Image: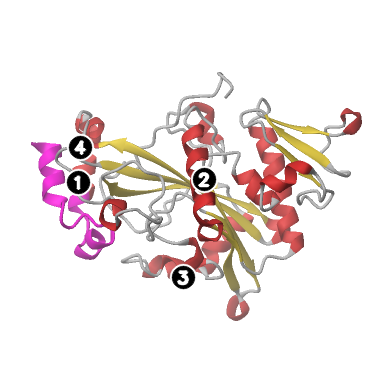
Amino acid sequence: MPSTLPSPARYFPLDKGLYEVAPGLHPLGRDFGNGPLDGQVFQVTRAFPRYRANKLRCREERFGKYVGDRDLAPDVSRAVNRFLVARLVAEHPGLFAIAREGGDAALDGGPFTLACAHTGDRIPFGADFELREGAPEAATFASAFDALCMQFECDLAVVRAEGAGETFRDWLARIHLCAPSHWAAEDKLGLPFTAIHAPIPHIEKVNAAAESLVRAMIHRGPYVRFVWGFATDDRLNHHPEPPPGEDPGAWRGRAFDEGREPSPFLLRVERQVTVGIPEASAALFGIHVSFLEGAAIRANERERALFASALRSLSPASRVYKSIEGSLDRVLAYLEG
């Protein structure tokens, strides 16, 4: 791993002290105190080995449980992969380099290899931006999209849309999700925005604006937003179906743990980034998971007050959705006691 990688970003997404079900979009690049990381779609920090190891475990368990496609045309796949290569090289020129015979580093114009300094991977691309057939390195990955998603920390989805008004259709067309928050990629593939978000209490107003939100993802932005949840372990993968041999209760990881050190719970934070690929009528949706220890929040007067206020603002349905209904009083007592 290069020694110049930055420390992980830290996000505390409760600046209003209120739980709201709303888009909550900010322009990508807004200053949250993390320097250049706040402007990056694909963060790669000193924590990267942890994210990579989790993705490798998921792949070994059952690839289709975490990765899949649905109704994704070849030209859209090409546009997505091309965007990913270009963005990675632009955001991390010290980590990613395009190599081609003769030293040409142009993105288009025939087969090339993407050299990834922090993993040692060399991803062979054909002119169609898919894995180059016959290249020995291609056997390591299921697809070019899979290979690229193994090079950064966040999970990634591709949203597609077509038509307008009564003929409007949007759907989740591709996903690489190894740090899910109690939902399964297989269950969401092919579904529209409204169906994907239907389980969230009080989502009705957001879903009513689904077409305009999906169009904004594709044609405007890029945007960043944050989602938070309650956790009592810092495991990245919280798929609703535990791997073979795992205890389902322990796997769920949402029971207040008096004996856990340094604190009995964590704040699970998702940094969600949307960036459009309008020429393909598609958008990328990145989900980057991190955790804040309850002890660190309690030690910060401002964060302690905001978090307690947000917890008290949860409706009964939202408490159940976030699986904090049985722990709320103990969390508040820990924060304020």
Q: Distance between the residues labelled 3 and 2?
A: 28 Å
Q: Distance between the residues labelled 4 and 3?
A: 37 Å
Quarter of the image for the C terminus: give it.
top left
Q: Which of 116 and 196 is in front in this view?
A: 116
Q: Residues within 10 Å of mark 4 (few under 14, many from 20)?
A: few
Q: Earlier in the sequence, mark 4 or mark 2?
A: 2
SS category of the residue bearing label 3: helix
Which residue lies under the disc numbered 4? 260
Q: How far apart are marks 3 and 1 (CA)?
A: 29 Å
Q: Which of marks 1 and 4 is nearer the N terminus?
A: 4
Residue 241, position as x, y percentages in the image: 39, 61
Q: Distance between the residues labelled 1 and 4?
A: 24 Å
What's the amino acid at mark 2? Lys
Which residue lies under the disc numbered 3? 194
Rendered residue at 34%/48% (across/down): 228
- Which of the two marks, 1 or 2, is nearer to us in this view? 2
Which residue lies under the disc numbered 2? 55
Report which quarter residue 78 is drawn in: bottom right
Q: Start and end of the magenta stretch?
A: 311-337
Residue 216, position as x, y percentages in the image: 57, 58
Per the picture, the main secondary structure of the magenta-coloured stretch is: helix
Report which quarter residue 265 is drawn in: top left
SS category of the residue bearing label 1: helix
**Left or right, 297 with reference to 75:** left
> Can the viewer see residue 209 in this picture?
no
Colour mapping used in the image: secondary structure
Rendered residue at 15%/51% (across/down): 328
What's the amino acid at mark 4? Arg
Rendered residue at 27%/41% (across/down): 266
What's the amino acid at mark 3? Thr
SS category of the residue bearing label 4: loop
- Which of the two marks, 4 or 3, is nearer to us in this view? 4
